[in-house]
Image (tube, rainbow, N blue to C red):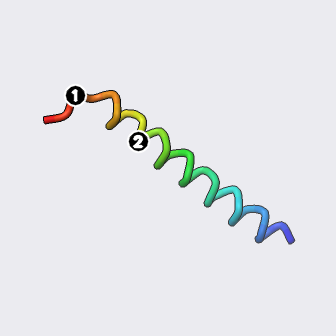
């Protein structure tokens, strides 16, 4: 149970990081 929770948490963190990176890219002017 704990292992699944940790894995889900890791996936959520990864998704959040991807989302943040995408937002940063969107803020940049298109080259």
Residue at 77 percent of width and 70 percent of height: 4
Name the residue carrying label 1: 29
Q: Is residue 30 left or right of residue 21?
A: left
30 above or below 8? above
Which numbered dot is residue 19? none
Q: Position of residue 6 (x, y in %)?
A: 73, 62
Name the secondary structure under disc 2: helix
17 above or below 26? below
Q: Position of residue 13 (x, y in %)?
A: 60, 50
Q: Is residue 5 left or right of residue 16?
A: right
Q: Residue furthest left?
A: 31
Closer-to-camera residue (31/2): 31
How dense is the environment of label 2, judged by Cα within 10 Å: few (below 14), some, or many (20 and up)?
few
Closer to the observer: label 1 or label 2? 1
3 above or below 20? below
Q: Residue furthest front?
A: 30
- Among the 4 quarters of the image, the one containing residue 11: bottom right
Contact, mark 1 vs mark 2 (Cβ under 8 Å): no
Name the secondary structure under disc 1: loop
Name the residue carrying label 2: 21
14 above or below 3? above
* Cα distance in 3D space between marks 1 and 2: 14 Å
Closer-to-camera residue (26/6): 26
Could you tell which of marks 1 and 2 lies nearer the N-terminus? 2
Residue at 78 percent of width and 63 percent of height: 5
Residue at 47 percent of width and 39 percent of height: 20
């Amino acid at each position: 149970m704990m292992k699944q929770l940790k894995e889900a948490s890791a996936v959520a963190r990864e998704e959040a990081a991807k989302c943040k990176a995408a937002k940063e890219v969107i803020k940049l002017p298109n080259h």
